Image (cartoon, grey):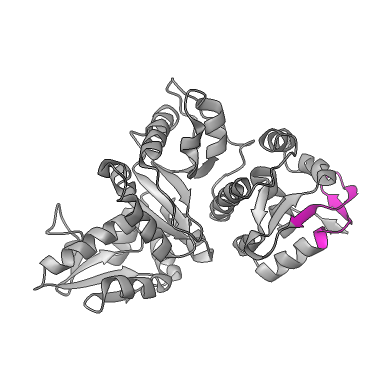
Amino acid sequence: MITVKAGSHVHQLLQMLAISMEFPASSLHLLGSERSIKDLVHKLESVQDIRFPPNESVLQTKMLTVSGWKETRNIRLSKSALPLLEGLHPGAPAYYLRASKNHQLSGDHHHIDRNHRVGEAIAMAAMAGLECRPYVLPQLVKNKLHQVVPAAPSFYIARDFKENHCDDMDKTVFTRVVGLAFSPGGCYAVYNVRNAVMKWSGKGELKVNLHITELVRCNAGLRDVNAVLLLGNTPEIALQTLLESDKSPKRATRIDRLYQYVHFIPLSTDGIQLLRILTLPDWNERVLDALFESEARLKGYGIMEYDAVVDGMYTLSHLDSDLSRLMRFQSALSSQADKQFMVACFPWQRDFLRAYLGERVKLRVISMEDLQNAIE
């Protein structure tokens, strides 16, 4: 018998599929021990007795259906398992049936890939401590000012605010943004490039930017959305996506023109830890205070993009994984031949930065655990 306890792997899987409807088997590692979860998925493909506290009711069913092969392997809820959703939350069954069109999910590759992008973003956010359940979060409003967004970090799925507020817009412009991540005092537009360079539709994404700006003004009291979380498998793919967006007919619509900050978040446990940091209150000041003495910090504007001067070296913190700042830093190196440079980074960023910046720039490697201890 399998018991669906809060926080267990089976509970996480059920919760995930209730929201995203589909999830890639290749990304199960985002939910915890990959081996344990894969074994559980295999077990749930056959009929099991599943018990859901606190009422102790038992449902004999096959919970999951799995199809596809390797990278395209896809996980869905079995139709006979839908009664289990009632144990998650009173609003879970209605949300799932509405989002899945009464459990009528398309087999089209593009629809599945879209759901996988959304599912991975939800998994990252949920594991980082953001509230992701649409049937728990208050619904976003439009055309009136109202403090709707919770004070605690939260993630709103793009499909939900599209359906409620975009009847007058061509919904094809929303083919890339997967959601909005709110943190105390800020908001990120969330994209997921996965393992391929994302085609950037400048005109469409400009419309998205204008629309979500209106939403955050109405619902969170924010002036605009000036930052992006760019999820993906490698920083190289994310950087190439940023460079490709520069080929848009209008330069004003490239990613780093629409959004001042572009944070790359790896689809991994490292990315989950980084996302947890980026949604803390005043996270940037807390990180920089932990890294640098106050007298070393940059005051006002400098000769280029950097955060402090340490032992005579102009130092940039890449602990925020901001690719747009990194690009500006790299482009200025050639014009500052008489100066020394250093970049603070995490271990998982080291190889990428060495290849991108060359041997001239010194790397100061800092563990995620040491940073978390310093800022928390």
Residue 111 versus residue 320: which sits nearer the camera?
111
Q: Quadrant of residue 88?
A: top right
Residue 195 versus residue 136: which sits nearer the camera?
195
At a point 71% along the width and 42% down the height, the residue shown is 105
Whether residue 77 is visible to the viewer of this picture, yes or no, is yes
Name of the residue lying farthest toward the top: 144
Where does residue 365 sit, x and y in percent of width and height? 35, 75
At a point 59% along the width and 47% down the height, the residue shown is 110
Residue 271 versus residue 284: which sits nearer the camera?
271
Where does residue 79 sit, x and y in percent of width and height? 81, 44
Where does residue 128 sit, x and y in percent of width and height? 53, 55
As drawn, 300 above or below 138: below
Name of the residue lying farthest toward the left: 338
297 sits to left or right of 46: left
Residue 249 versus residue 12: which sits nearer the camera?
249
At a point 69% along the width and 56% down the height, the residue shown is 74
Where does residue 37 sit, x and y in percent of width and height? 71, 64
At a point 45% along the width and 65% down the height, the residue shown is 234
Q: What segment carries the magenta color?
A: 43-66
39 sits to left or right of 340: right
Residue 247 shown in magenta: no
As drawn, 240 above or below 175: below
Name of the residue lying farthest toward the bottom: 359
138 sits to left or right of 297: right
